[in-house]
Amino acid sequence: MGFALTVVYIVVTIISPEQFGPEWANYHAFMYLAGITFLFSLPAIFSRTELRSSIQIYLMLAFIVSIALSAVANGWIGGAFASWQIFLPSAAVFFFIVANVTTIRRLKILTLASVASCLVVVVEALCGYYGGFRGNMFVLQQSLYSNDEVMGQVARLRGAGFLSDPNDFAQILIIALPLVSIAWQKRRGFAHALIVFIPAVTLLWAIYLTHSRGAFIALALLALIAAKKRLGNTASVVLTAGLVLVMVALDFTGNRGISLVEGADRVEAWTSGLEMFKSAPLFGVGFGNFTNFNDITAHNSFVLCLAELGIVGSTIWVGLLVTTILSLNRIIKIQEPRRVRASAEDAENMKETASFAAGLCPSDSFSTEAITTTNATDVGLKAEPMHRSIIPEHWPVAMRLALIGFMATSWFLSRSYQTPMYLIVGLATATIGLQRPSAQSRIRNRWVFSALAVEAVAITVIYGIGQLRH
C-alpha cells in the first residue's frame, strides 16, 4: 500500500492539481496524501535494515536539520517549523521512494510513472501551444527586450504548479529524458523501440518549446557524456558541436542570447550570494531569506544554498549529490568489466559451462555471489571477482545522466529545495540500495572532503565569472 501511495503522491505532484483551479490548493490535498503515505511507509522504514547503510538518507536528515538551524541562528526559532513546512513536501518524495522501492520491478514502475506524468503535462501543454487549450496556463508569452525596449514576444511552454516557470518545466523534462530508456529491453524488436523513441522525441520537442537557455546547455552536456562512452572523445565532441549548431539554427533559446551581458542580472545575484555567505559563513542568512538581501533570487541552486544555509547546509546539499554520483559511478564501473570479460570468454567457456551442467566439474568451483574470471589475462585484464549485477546495466547510466541533467540546469535556477532534485536523488538512491555496491563504505568516509572540494571549485568559478563581468 505504501508503494502505491508513493506512486500516486509523485504523479499528483508532477501533474499538479492546481491546473484544475486555484481552489484545489486550499484543500491541502498534498498534506493529507503525504500523511497517509507516511503512515503506510512506516513499516518499511523500520523493517528495512539496509536503509541504515545509505549515506544519502543520513545526509537528507542532516539537511533538514541544517534548514532549521539556519532559521534559529538568525534569531527566528519559529522559522524552523515554517521552513520545514515549505521543504518537507519535497523531502517526502525522497523518503517515500527509498522506503517503498524494494524491488527492481517497483523501481521500474515508479520511474516510468514519473516519466508518464511528465508526458501527460507535455501533451496538455502542447494542446495549449498549438490548439489554445487553456493556453494561458501552459504557454507563457514572454517579452523580449533590447535597451529597455520591447522588441517582440516569444511563446514558451510550461506546466502547472511548481512547473509554471518554463525553465522549471524544462528541468524536469531534462531529468525525464534519460529515464525513458528504463523502458528499453534488449531483443524486443522495432515495435518495442518505438515505446522509447516516441516519448523521447516528444520530450525533446517540449524542451525545445520551453526555449530554456539552461536546457540548451544541459542537452549539449548530456549529448557529450552519452556519446563519449560509445564514440570516444573526438567523435563525441564533434557530435556535440553538431548538435549545438542544429539547436542554434532552430533558434532553441527563442532569440535570447547566452552571454555575460545577457545574464548580467544573474551574475550580480551570484556575487550578492557570495557576499551573503561572507556575512554569515556558518549557517547562512536563513532559509528563504535570499530575496531579503537582493532584488532577485540567486538563479543558481548552489549559490542559493550557500547563501541561505551557509557552509554547513551547502556542504550537506553538495554531499548528497556527490555521494549519489560516486555510488552510481561505482555500479557502472563494476558492470563494465563484466561486459568486457563476458564477451571475451563466452566462446571459450561454453564447453566448461556445458561440462559443469553435466556434473563433470567440481561443485565448489563456482560461487553464486561472485564469479572469478580464469582467463582475464587473455584480454589484458587482472583477474578479480565479478560482483553479481542486480540492476540492468543501462539503468545506473540513465540515473546518472538524469542527475547530471538536474545539476546542469540547476546552475541557472534556484531550485535547491524543489521536488525534481529529490525525485531523481531518491530514484538513484533506490537503485544504489538494490545494487548495494561495495564502495559505499569508502564513499561514506570521504564525502566531506569531496563535497568541500566541489564547493571550492564552484565558488572559485562563480567569483571568477563575477570578476569578468565587472
Image: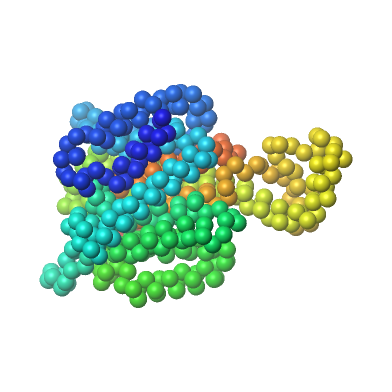
Q: Nearer the viewer, residue 386 or 108?
A: 108
Q: Is residue 290 visible?
A: no
Q: How many marks?
A: 0
Q: Residue at x 76, y 47 (%)?
A: 373
* 64 to 303, vertically: above or below: above
Q: Residue at x 27, y 30 (%)?
A: 32
Q: Is residue 286 left or right of residue 119?
A: left
Task: Locate the N terminus by quadrant.
Answer: top left
Q: Residue at x 36, y 25 (%)?
A: 39
Task: Locate the C terminus by quadrant.
Answer: bottom left
The extreme front residue here reads 191
> Quadrant location of residue 10?
top left
* 147 to 300, vertically: above or below: below
Q: Position of residue 119 (x, y in %)?
A: 35, 54
Q: Is residue 45 visible?
A: yes
Q: Is residue 341 left or right of residue 220?
A: right
Q: Position of residue 115 (x, y in %)?
A: 40, 50
Q: Position of residue 269 (x, y in %)?
A: 24, 55
The extreme right residue here reads 360
Q: Position of residue 162 (x, y in %)?
A: 26, 47
The extreme left residue here reads 149
Q: Is residue 47 left or right of residue 90?
A: right
Q: Residue at x 30, y 64 (%)?
A: 209
Q: Is residue 212 left or right of residue 452?
A: left
> Quadrant location of residue 100?
top left
Q: Nearer the viewer, residue 39 or 276?
A: 39
Q: Nearer the viewer, residue 279 or 404?
A: 404
> How is the rendered protein coloured?
rainbow
Q: Nearer the viewer, residue 371 or 361?
A: 361
